[in-house]
Amino acid sequence: MQFTLGYLADLFISRILDGSWLILAFKLRYTVYSLRIFRSFLGISELRSFVGMRQFKWVFLGLSLALSFVACQKSAPKTGSIISSPKDGSSVEVNQILTFAGKVVLKDGVSLGDEAVKWELRAFTDASEPSIVEELTVSQGQGSFSIGDYGDTLERLELCLGADGFDTQCIRLLPKKVTYRFETSPAGLALEWNGNSRQTPFEVDALVGAERELSAPVEQNGLEFVSWNDAGLSTRTLTIAKEAKTLTASYEERAPTANCGALAQEAEAGVVFGDMKLLTTATASGGKAVGSDENASLDYTENPDARHRVDYCMKVATPGIYRIKTWVAGQSVGADSFLIQVNKGDAYTYSFADIVRNANPFPSFTEDYVKGLNVADPLEFNFSAGDQRLSFYLREDGAQLDKLELELIKATPENGFLESILIPSVANDWQTVTTVKSYQNPIVVCTARRENNTLPALARVQKAALNSFEVKLQNPSSETLLAEQVTCLVAEQGVWQLADGRKFEAQTYPTSQADGALGSWAGQKLSYENSYTKPVVFGQVMSANNATWGSFWSRGDSRADAPSAQYVRMGLQMGEDPAQLKTDRQAEQITYMVFEAGSGTVDGSAYEVALGAAAIAGVENANPGGSYSFTKSFATVPEFAIATVAGFTGGDGAWASLAGATPLSASGIKLIVDEDQVGDSERWHPEERVSYLVFEKGVALNLSRP
């Protein structure tokens, strides 16, 4: 009986169970043998008296089976999508570098390779579906990324891992937010938060680490802005800190306004405030200068303080390109700069250290020109006819100004030109392009087609002159590229209108600042010379003064917004390239064109200029690129187009290209966005908004002033 039951149990187990269940077979067999020993130890009569022998043996067998099953389950490897780090519910902040790891495990315990799994970062605002989805790359199951700025309505991020045939696992990443309160003195005045006017007091819950634009109108309700309680220019970029904060803008009765006068003025003709005072000095023209002495209450600041400044107004009769000539002196090597504001725009740091430190001619005044930080050449400003306002802010005590002058460099012609140029083949070397028209101050914007290259490629421009410019293709990682077709639009700098009355302007400014994913997306705040209802912005880096790459970008209230009628920032972007963080960059020339959106016909050529929806994807997306349909189909396939990304949905930066061998049809345009591979190799990119201008035929148009 004992032998028969043990044998049958072993036979049953060996016939039915295999693989990972073999452990269970051994456990069951051991249990049966243990039962025999246990019975021998107690004695048959005792077991029979406790419970019937047959029932007792099968009870032990059932219990052994259950316990062994549990043990086997615990020893089997976990399968499916497994995210090992970070933890679900982790807190994150903007620009934080987050490292993640995970794997997709098969039933046999083997993990899928990196190429077979899919990592995604999903951003959720107040909607149930993610507003942004970004693909992430890994190496050996690990990776990292920088937390982007997805706006203050962001509720959560989800980091997700999946693969074909497996369920996707997601963990939540919770954004850190902090409350900022805004007030004015006197109370109840308006402030602009990210381009939107709001009456004070008000509070916002902002993402920690994000950058936000805060602006106090220079004048309102008969009052003039004086200062913030923590110092700073009326318009400023805030980096949101971890602690709650209250910011108060103080206003006073409007100060005297400088009367508009000649282009050349003595410094004492301005209206002075605070520690910027009239000084008596024998070496100054007329015996008077403006500045501060070495014992000023404010001895140094990087932020213009409206309490310590001098204002000037100059009446420009001839529109054109101007420089600001100065006669300056500094009492020491720590007294060699001002902060300069033109027409209430962003401030420039004007340093004349080369005068003070090399010759130190104090108390003599030396002729100079206003230059930007790390900009060797004088800054140039495009002024229309009318009043131009300048402010010199105290930056270092001891800096002094004797006189100043707006010096005309090139007058804007009464009539200008706009022409389209198609260059069939552009490769890695600079190529000279001749224009049909001649230009005093040419503004050039180009777009490369993406047809032959698999690597990222963008168009670069330099040496724009009277009737020519140079163009080439550039790969951000300095890889060799195949030739592509490039289209360029060239215009005379200035404020214009097309023959059908459409508003248009072409402008330029220098910058040594590089924006990008590793720094900030601040750009330079600018103002339109024309007024627009629906502005469409195009741009170009029109110089090559640094060995590294760079492309034009623009934005509105935030990085993700396109330029609006009320607010625009522009700049040079370097995506994920660490070179953007260098502080010794040479200045590059940024050129841009702005059109009023719409369509029409000029010089026999139909055209359309528009800002498209967020529908143009990256090179490595499942569905690369995208297309826009024209408002009205052209009679024939258009011959010319340019395109520029407007704002950045994605945080890696990008530029736009015409897509494929036939990017244009009578009814629409095909586009694609691409990004650099300097920081990482991936080129997946969320869908972006792109501005485009299409001419049915090539044009060489006459422009007139509005």
Image (tube, rainbow, N blue to C red):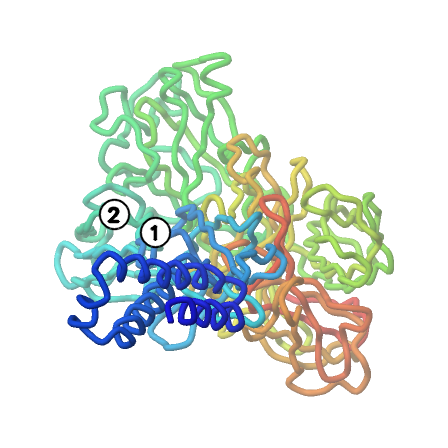
Q: Residues within 10 Å of mark 2 (few under 14, many from 20)?
A: some
Mark yes or no: residue 706 visible: no
Residue 331 is tagged as none
**Residue at 45% from the left image edge and 72% from the top image edge:** 8
Amino acid residing under circle 2? Lys
Q: Nearer the viewer, mark 2 or mark 1?
A: 1
Q: Mark 1 highlights which residue? A: 93
Left or right of residue 213, residue 457 in this image: right
Count numbered badges in the picture. Answer: 2
**Residue at 70% from the left image edge and 65% from the top image edge:** 642
Q: Quadrant of residue 549?
A: top right
Q: Which one is nearer the viewer's eye here, 305 or 8?
A: 8
In this view, the residue farthest toward the right is 424
**Residue at 67% from the left image edge and 62% from the top image edge:** 619
Left or right of residue 528, residue 669 in this image: right
Q: Mark 2 highlights which residue? A: 242
129 to 562, vertically: above or below: below
Label 2 with label 1: CB-CB less than 8 Å: yes
Left or right of residue 561, residue 686 in this image: right
Check the picture and name the quadrant holding the N terminus: bottom left
User: SS class of the residue under badge 2?
Assistant: loop
Q: Residues within 10 Å of mark 1 (few under 14, many from 20)?
A: many
Residue 356 in the image, given as x and y percentages of width and height: 45, 17
